Image (spheres, rainbow, N blue to C red):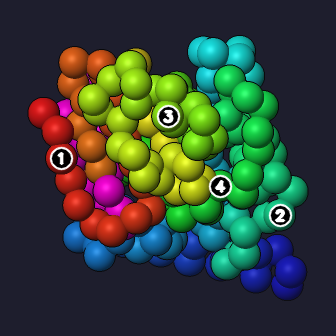
Amino acid sequence: MTMDLISRRGILGVFAATSVAAAPVMANAFGFLRGAGDMRRVRMYSGRTGESIDTVYWVDGKYIRESLNEINIFMRDWRTGEVIGIDPRTVDVAAASARLMQTNEPYMMLSGYRSPRTNAMLRRQSSGVAQNSLHMTGKAADLRLKSRSVGQMYQAAVACRAGGVGRYSRSNFVHMDCGPVRSWGS
């Protein structure tokens, strides 16, 4: 009896995931993540620190506090060591984009949280750094994939309609944030 119930649930879960994958027109990242087996996972590594993370951070409609804490530490300002709470919606955008691109490859994270001091230093070095960057509030990440082009990553993130997406082709990365829906870059 229990085995039949589990099998039915498993089959229904597969059908739910298939129906979402077959109908890719959703309003935002959270819609793309529905039907993902009631779990969300993120995979990233940092070339700067040599660290990596592969964690399930959301299960059955709830974020997992311990996983979010791991993400906060991983996405810290590597220059200063400062850690703040990363907005989980930023992670949702990255996870939804990876799902749309049908990749299990971990993102290379170039920048997560940036302290105001780090942001000011980067602004002095580049005109492409915003004075009030969402990186300073834990709401943005600059990401790269080896197996996908900047254009493919950009299109997937834009399709999520869940925040800002910047294409930085010359620097080979995509900015994803959970701020207002907008896009820029070439």
Q: Mark 2 points at which residue?
A: 65
Say few, some or many: other residues with alpha carbon within 10 Å of mark 1 (under 14 / 14 to 19 / 20 or more). Answer: few
Q: Nearer the viewer, mark 2 or mark 3?
A: 3
Q: Which of marks 1 and 2 is in front?
A: 1
The span shown in magenta is 149-164
Residue 120's tag is 3
Relative depth, front residue between 166 and 16: 166
Mark 1 element type: strand
Amino acid type indicated by mark 2: Arg
Tell me if 83 is positioned left or right of 109 in this view: right
Q: Determine the CA span between mark 1 and mark 4.
A: 23 Å
- The image position of residue 50, as x and y in percent, is 71, 15
Relative depth, front residue between 122 and 35: 122
Q: Name the residue under label 4.
A: 86
Q: Name the residue under label 1.
A: 184
Query: Quick one: label 4 or label 3, which is nearer the N terminus?
Result: 4
Mark 3 element type: helix
Query: Quick one: label 1 or label 2, which is nearer the N terminus?
Result: 2
